Image (cartoon, grey):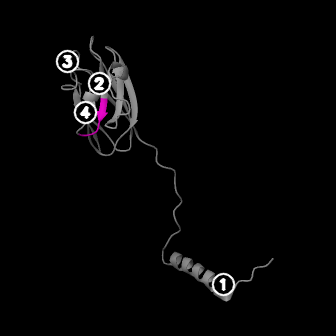
Amino acid sequence: MTKITSRREFLKLGGLSLVGVAIAACGGAAPAATSAPAAKSAVTLEIASKGEELLYDKDTLTAPAGSSITLKLKNNSSALQHNWVLVKAGKSDTVAADGLAAGEAANYVKEKDANVIAHLAIVKPGETGTITFDAPAPGSYPYICTFPGHYVLMKGTLIIK
């Protein structure tokens, strides 16, 4: 069956085609083809405990925005256990208190805590723990050890640029 196009419909269709030609002639370009997203840069950060002191060996770590961060925590203590918890700004006290309440079975981190960006499980003396996570938005984020009694001294800042 043949469709009959009215003069008005024909002019509408022709007019739209002419608009497209005019845009192209005036330097307009066809929409760019979408390309695959760029691969994330991978960054490895290393941090350690300072022997039997309640301190990390680095109080500042830096990583680029949009990167995949692998953090390695070396526990240099012969007796103390430690973890590494990255928290939202201003939430360190809350995360530490909630972690204490969560207990050892939860690695001293409240399950599904919205204030925790990433966390590494408890690392035993002489061992190394590793975690990989996506960098948060640019800014400064505190990291703490939530093992009981460690939080007050064992902390630092992750700066995302």
Q: Main secondary structure of the magenta part?
A: strand
- Residues in magenta, as a range: 85-89
Residue bearing mark 4: 94
Q: Residue at x 64, y 87 (%)?
A: 8
CA–CA distance in space, label 1 to label 4: 69 Å
Q: Is residue 47 visible?
A: no
Q: Residues within 10 Å of mark 4 (few under 14, many from 20)?
A: few
Q: Compared to 38, does 156 lie above or below?
A: above
Residue bearing mark 1: 10
Q: Residue at x 40, y 32 (%)?
A: 132
Give the quadrant of the N terminus.
Answer: bottom right
Of the residues under marks 4 and 2, which one precedes in the sequence? 4
- Identify which amino acid the numbered label 2 is placed on: Ala
Q: Residue at x 32, y 24 (%)?
A: 102
Q: Residues within 10 Å of mark 3 (few under 14, many from 20)?
A: some
- Identify which amino acid the numbered label 3 is placed on: Glu
CA–CA distance in space, label 2 to label 1: 74 Å
Residue bearing mark 3: 53
Percent position (x, y) of residue 29? Answer: 51, 70
Residue bearing mark 2: 101
Can you tell which quarter of the image residue 83 is in? top left
Query: In the image, which is nearer the foreground, mark 4 or mark 2?
Result: 2
Percent position (x, y) of residue 75? Answer: 30, 18
Q: Residue at x 28, y 39 (%)?
A: 88
- Identify which amino acid the numbered label 4 is placed on: Thr
Left or right for 148, reference 68: left
- Identify which amino acid the numbered label 1 is placed on: Phe
Query: In the image, which is nearer the foreground, mark 3 or mark 2?
Result: 2
Give the quadrant of the C terminus.
Answer: top left
Q: Residues within 10 Å of mark 1 (few under 14, many from 20)?
A: few
